[in-house]
Image (spheres, rainbow, N blue to C red):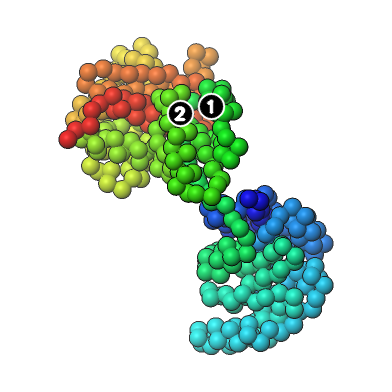
Amino acid sequence: MKQVTAELLTIGDEILYGQIVDTNSQWMGVELSNMGIRVLRKTSVGDIESEILQALKEAEERADIILITGGLGPTNDDLTKPCLAKYFNCDLVMNEEALTEVTEFFKSRGRELTELNKMQAALPSACEKITNHGGTAPGMWFGKGNKVFMSMPGVPHEMKKMMIEQVMPRLKKQYDLPVIHHKVIRTIGIGESFLADKIKDWEDALPEHIKLAYLPSLGEVKLRLTCFGSSLKALEAEAEKQTATLKQLVDQYIYGYGEEPIEVVIGNMLRERKMTLSIAESCTGGKVSHMITSVPGSSEYFQGSIIPYSYDIKMAQLGVKEETLNQYGAVSEQTIIEMATLVREKFNTSIGVATSGIAGPGGATPEKPVGTVWIALADGGRVITKKLQLAKERHLNIQLSSMAVLNLIRLSIKESPVKA
């Protein structure tokens, strides 16, 4: 089965200037992938006729389907329609059906239809008009051999409605599309290159119709298996088989699958084991607590937290010994052990965790450079500590420390049995 490809073309200076974020391409990429259409490229072009025409030409050379968004307004800087008319060597003509729709749209909202607004019904004669059920700018469908050009409004809710109701069904009819299945495996506690090295032989042995992608982010790496074929059931079974083999290699790093982030997985684990959690955060400043409480229902297992940023608060509110701070400093194994133990006792929880470090850019010493972080977990029977040597940038250290703490929690409660 021949692979069907697409290119996404966004038009407008506002995207290149960063005044508008292109969420359309991200959404379309997901939807097209789920249909079995492979997106080859996403291109953004400003409001310059020659650039738009060149982008259309290059997209046609690469892809079967060219999906265009933006530039359909009635003002002079909206160039998509005249450029498409020039590209397809035709004139802009008033489309009576589109004019009726635009007129009714304004009438239904009690607004006057101006001459400028009427021009939204002027379309290239070579296109087939696609009704915009959410706005005034019609979509335009062009066929050129076995290629399709589809121009849509840049307003996200208008584009999505048009895609779902009209464009996607037409594409499914026109093209013989393969079945596609994605399987996402989420890992934590291992870098991308180290993970790739551990699973190299497994990756090399994947069949031709299964592709692996590494999707790294701060503190974790997602692996995405993309399977192509003719039977969804068969692809799902094959993906599960490959995942089972992968799990034998890196089980300790796999924390979940699909779209559930680490904080959701930890919440489920705590709930299943009827365990509770409390947190003492210094260098992370509440980031871990925020991640935990972003999950609905977290009050079932999260009791509370304290942010003992200064020496005084560490001593007065948490109970860290003055001699510990004076002798070892706030960023030390001795201090972090007390913090985790004391917050667990203070909130009467199954687990207490703590963070203390030098997030930067100041506060460093030769012995404790920026990025030095201690984390700890106390569960009543033991205290687990870990020293991290992270980055030179503050926001990176906060995020990476938070992810490391969450992974420490995961590994700890993974050893506890699920309670009936």
Q: Nearer the viewer, residue 400 or 268?
A: 268
Q: Which mark is residue 245?
A: 2
Q: Foreground residue, 85 or 307?
A: 85
| Up-down relation of residue 370 to residue 12 (above or below) | above
Is 326 situated left or right of 400 in this image?
A: left
**Residue under numbered circle 1:** 202
Decide: few, some or many residues near mark 2? Use Cα within 10 Å; few <14, some 14-19, many ≥20: few
Q: Secondary structure at mark 1?
A: helix
Q: Where does residue 403 sit, x and y in percent of width and height?
A: 43, 32
The quarter holding residue 193 reads top right
What's the residue type where badge 1 is placed?
Answer: Trp
Quick check: can you spot residue 255?
Answer: yes
Dot 2: element? helix
Q: Residues within 10 Å of mark 1 (few under 14, many from 20)?
A: few
Figure quadrant of residue 385: top left
Toward the left, the furthest residue is: 420
Residue 13 can be seen, yes or no: no
Does residue 333 appear to the left or right of 158 in the view shown?
A: left
Please tell me which residue is depicted at 43% across the width and 24% down the height of the picture: 248
Is label 1 in contact with label 2 (beta carbons under 8 Å)?
yes
Q: Quadrant of the C terminus?
A: top left
Amino acid type at circle 2 is Thr
Locate residue 257: give its quadrant.
top left
- Residue at left offset 60%, top offset 87%: 100
Mark linked to residue 366: none
Q: Nearer the viewer, residue 201 or 305?
A: 201
> Horizontal and vertical percent for residue 277?
26, 33
State the CA–CA distance, disc 1 to disc 2.
8 Å
Dot 1 or dot 2: first in sequence order is 1
Q: Is residue 248 left or right of residue 300?
A: right
